[in-house]
Image: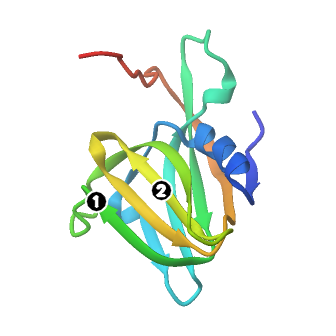
Amino acid sequence: MDSLKLIALDDADLAVISACLQDAVFKTGDTAFLGKDQTFTLEANRFVWEEGKDKKTFERRRAVLAVKQVQAVRSRGIDLKDADTVHALLAVTFVAGDEAPSGAIELVLSGGGVIRLEVDCVEVQFADIGGGWETKFKPRHPVGG
């Protein structure tokens, strides 16, 4: 499989990146906000969903998400002082603001955590940055409870 490199300039593009990053895992310390550059980055080990679902073994790849035009970063349900806490990313969504094209990009995490990025517009880059490795574990999302 070739490495992915994607750009999102609207919420439809962002939905594609969200699908690629569903069930990615990362540590709190794998995030950074460069206020001067207005850029938020996240490095994660993503599950390679595009490889197909009828396999006995699966793959993860190291990937980076870079969100540009970020004015502020807020979080809920995350201990920012514990850099080694592991999080699972469920979705990357756009919430429109009062004046287009501004709004917020939300990184929705399992367990109820959210990282909210206040942005001037949607400008997101996503890329695999390393080779893949095998895993036998496919993420599951049981329904009900």
- Label disc, if present, on residue 126 of the rendered structure: none
Task: Compute the Cα span from label 2 to label 1.
Answer: 11 Å
Q: Quadrant of the C terminus?
A: top left
Residue in the picture at 62% in, 39% down = 20
| Residue 82 percent location from the top left of the image | 22, 63
Q: Earlier in the sequence, mark 2 or mark 1?
A: 1
- Where residue 57 appears, as percent x and y from the top left, is 54, 17
Residue highlighted by disc 1:
76
Residue that appears at 24% across and 55% down: 77
Label 2 environment density (alpha carbons within 10 Å; few <14, some 14–19, many ≥20):
some
Identified by mark 1, the residue type is Arg
Tell me: residue 142, above or below residue 93.
above
Quarter of the image that includes the N terminus: top right
Picture layout, residue 34 above or below residue 121: below
Query: What element does badge 1 sit on?
Result: strand
Within 10 Å of disc 1 (Cα), the crowding (few <14, some 14-19, many 20+) is few
Q: Which residue shows up at 61% across the image and 37% down it?
A: 19
In the image: residue 46, left or right of residue 85 = right
Quarter where residue 125 is shown:
bottom right
Residue 127, quarter of the rendered image:
bottom right
**Is mark 2 in CB contact (under 8 Å) with mark 1?**
no
Task: Report the amino acid beneath label 2.
Answer: Glu
Residue closest to the eye, 92 or 43: 92
Q: Position of residue 26 (x, y in %)?
A: 41, 51
Residue found 59% across the figure and 85% down from its top: 37
Q: Which mark is residue 106?
A: 2
Chosen colour scheme = rainbow
Image spot of residue 104 (x, y percent): 52, 64
Secondary element at tag 2:
strand
In the depicted view, which residue is nearer to us: 12 or 59? Answer: 12
